[in-house]
């Protein structure tokens, strides 16, 4: 696979609803990076599983992923708790993870020339997909804070789900994602821990930006 040289690569892992996506988008904007929300790929496959039922197969997944574009991942029908849980279940599968690896590698190490680099967030980005990233972060928050944030997001878009249901679902996904055999969610030693429980979005971004600026200065990039 082709790898662009001298680009900024940022890897983020986090449990669901910890604020990683919000921060990743802000960082992408600030440093002109290609942003890939890798959870959306698993959600896309999770949705495919719900829609296709018995017709769902790894062959079908491969066929779809071979043709996928980042713009296919911004569909609103991927934002539901049912799809998220289905994503978490198919994400345990080693063959499925293998199918999506190339797409993620390509976004990470070979972003289009107009970008100065890439930023990916997910569950196995720091540990598997971007082991050699310029910088790695593990973003987390207290489970109740995360459930409240996700519940309010759902409420805003009129999704009918209670806080209790959201909390239960996040706990279930945390368990599945952290305890699976292949590519479990974990904080790697070289990742910087950011706990967003008591931080505003802005305060969190300022903290991350200061760390990135320091690293880029050391590397002689700015
Ligand atoms: O990030 P998001 O909550 O959209 O991810 C949905 C699910 O996709 C996660 O709960 C996880 O099981 C799976 N996932 C994964 N590896 C990634 C990103 C997401 O297994 N890199």
Image (spheres, rainbow, N blue to C red):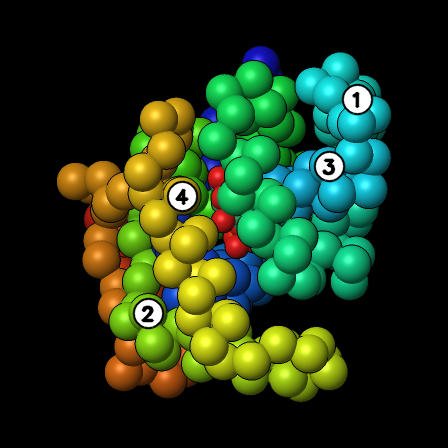
Which of the marked residues, 4 or 1, is nearer the chain's N terminus? 1
Where residue 6 sits, quadrant-wise, is: top left
Foreground: disc 3 or disc 1: 3
Which of the marked residues, 4 or 3, is nearer the chain's N terminus? 3
Residue drawn at 67 percent across, 85 percent down? 156
Mark 1 surroundings within 10 Å by alpha-carbon count, few (fewer than 14), some (14 through 19), many (20 or more): some
Residue identified by numbered label 4 = 176
**Side (left or right) of 19 relative to 136:** right
Residue identified by numbered label 2 = 143
Q: Vertical placement of 161 versus 104: above or below? A: below
Q: Nearer the viewer, residue 49 or 74?
A: 49
Foreground: disc 4 or disc 1: 4
Q: Vertical placement of 130 versus 139: above or below? A: above
Residue identified by numbered label 3 = 49
Residue identified by numbered label 1 = 60
For the residues marked 3 and 2, what is the alpha-carbon distance in whole angstroms? 28 Å
- Numbered disc 4: secondary structure: helix
Quarter of the image where the N terminus is located: top right
Q: Nearer the viewer, residue 145 or 138?
A: 145
Residue drawn at 77 percent across, 38 percent down? 48
**Side (left or right) of 118 relative to 171:** right
Q: Are marks 3 and 2 in contact (CB under 8 Å)?
A: no
Image x and y of residue 30, in percent: 51, 65
- Label 4 C-beta lies within 8 Å of the nearest ligand 1 atom: yes
Which of the marked residues, 2 or 4, is nearer the chain's N terminus? 2
């Amino acid at each position: 696979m082709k790898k662009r040289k001298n680009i900024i690569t940022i890897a983020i892992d986090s449990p669901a609803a910890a604020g990683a996506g919000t921060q990743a988008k802000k960082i992408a904007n600030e440093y002109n990076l290609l942003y890939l929300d890798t959870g959306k790929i698993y959600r896309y496959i999770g949705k495919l599983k719900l829609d296709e039922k018995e017709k769902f197969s790894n062959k079908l997944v491969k066929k779809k992923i071979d043709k996928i574009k980042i713009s296919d991942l911004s569909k609103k029908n991927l934002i539901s708790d049912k799809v998220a849980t289905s994503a978490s279940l198919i994400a345990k599968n080693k063959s499925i993870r293998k199918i999506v690896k190339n797409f993620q590698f390509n976004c990470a190490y070979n972003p289009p020339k107009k970008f100065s680099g890439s930023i990916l967030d997910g569950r196995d980005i720091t540990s598997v997909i971007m082991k050699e990233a310029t910088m790695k972060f593990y973003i987390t928050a207290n489970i109740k804070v995360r459930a409240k944030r996700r519940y309010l997001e759902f409420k805003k878009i009129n999704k009918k789900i209670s806080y209790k249901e959201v909390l239960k679902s996040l706990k279930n996904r945390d368990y599945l994602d952290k305890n699976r055999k292949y590519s479990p969610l974990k904080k790697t030693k070289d990742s910087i821990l950011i706990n967003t429980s008591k931080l505003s979005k802005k305060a969190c971004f300022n903290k991350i930006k200061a760390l990135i600026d320091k690293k880029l200065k050391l590397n002689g990039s700015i």
